[in-house]
Amino acid sequence: MKPVLLSLVAALGLAVAPALHAQQQILNASYDISRELFGDVNKAFVPYWKEKSGQDVQVKQSHAGSSKQALAIREGLQADVVTFNQATDVDALADSKLVARDWATKFPDNASPYYSVHTILVRKGNPKGIHDWSDLAKPGVAIVQVNPKTGGNGRYAALAYYAYALEKSGGDAAKARAFLKSVLANVVVFDTGGRGATTTFVEREIGDVLVTFESEALSLAHGPGASYEVVTPSVSILSEFPVAVVDKVAKKRGTAAVAKAYLDFLYTPQGQDILARNFFRPRDNEVAARYAAQLASVKTLEVSKVFGSWDKVTEQFFANGALIDTLLKENASEVAR
């Protein structure tokens, strides 16, 4: 081989070798209240991936309402993975051919490595005597929650109210409608996202009750100097947290392997323990048993079994002109009289 050619090959080798070991970077687009959770996950995943692959990785986070994140990705946000709080937002990405159509089969448990329920946070001493969802319909109870038109957190809250009323009334849809209307009438702030609702309740000191994911409520109640209590309702709705690789982005950026490994990590015993420490309910039975004392037993209803598909739920409750819009307009008209 001629010296010039040898020099060229050597130069190419020197150029390629660093690229093979260059640090990769992935972006996780997640819902509003998961900042602390994925901060802990990322700290554990970086050394896990280094040991597993020999490769350095940096995981960046993006947080907003789940539906806002889906829209941002459709408009160009280069997220490698999504960790959302409702399946419809991942479906929106599938409709745009950004994630696989069969995304829910790519990981166990319908691609939901953990779950939660909706619960009630009250101020210390529970001055309004809140013990179950029924108490939220009483006169004089001021509720803070996420707007069900803008965030999955708020949608799960509305479905929890309605499902509870169905359960207590033996399936009477008229009574469930009336109960949902009464609770919504007591909402004093509809925030656009979960962390915004927390800020309104905690920092602005508005409201008697914060309705949110159990994980958020427990983290506030167990925080240093906390002046809050968690009221676990007798019946709640199961909230799943679907995950997916954004295939179109990951393939383009060459991050498909590490992106999948990141989501696989959530299913490992280490990942499941991190989820449980952050007050989410793990899928792993052994991990769940270790954290049983902090996650109270509650009758949990699945959205699909009570309401049908998420498409049906959206059409019935959350689409423009659907039940939520109707009830809010009725409440506004009654206040204006």
Image (cartoon, helix red, strand yellow):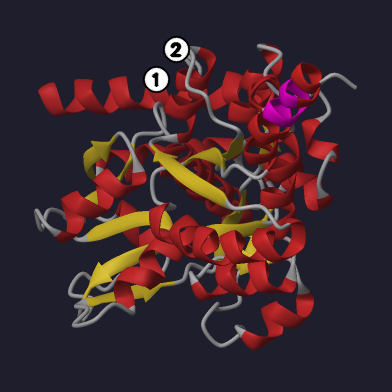
Q: CA distance from mark 1 to mark 2?
A: 6 Å
Q: Which residue is mark 1?
A: 326
**Disc 2: CA contacts within 10 A as few (<14), some (14-19) or many (>=20):** few
Q: SS for tag 1?
A: helix
The region drawn magenta spans 7-12
**Label 1 CA crowd tier, 10 Å (few <14, some 14–19, many 20+):** some
Q: Which mark is residue 321?
A: 2
Pointers 1 and 2 in contact (CB under 8 A)? yes
Amino acid found under the numbered disc labelled 2: Gly
- Mark 2 falls on what kind of element? loop
First of labels 1, 2 by sequence position: 2
Q: Mark 1 is on which residue type?
A: Thr
Q: Would you say residue 10 sits in the magenta stretch?
A: yes
Quarter placement of the N terminus: top right
User: Is residue 101 in sight in this rendering?
Assistant: yes
Instruction: Let me know if residue 186 is in the magenta part.
Output: no
Relative vertical location of residue 102 with respect to residue 84 in this rendering, above or below:
above
- What residue lies at 34% left-to-right and 34% top-to-bottom? 147
Give how far across and how far down residue 3 sits, in percent: 79, 22
- Whether 143 is drawn above or below 282: the answer is above
Identify the residue shown where x is 75% and y is 56%. Answer: 53
- Looking at the picture, tell me which residue is in the foreground, 214 or 315: 214
Instruction: Please provide percent x and percent y for residue 78.
Output: 52, 24
Q: Is residue 189 left or right of residue 51?
A: left
User: Could you say where residue 208 lies in the image, as x and y percent from the top left?
Assistant: 19, 61
Q: Height in image: 110 above or below 134?
A: above
Is 4 drawn above or below residue 42 in the view shown?
above
Residue 102 lies left or right of residue 49; in this view the side is: right
**Residue 320 position in % (x across, y down):** 45, 12
Q: Quadrant of the C terminus?
A: top left
Q: Quadrant of residue 188?
A: top left
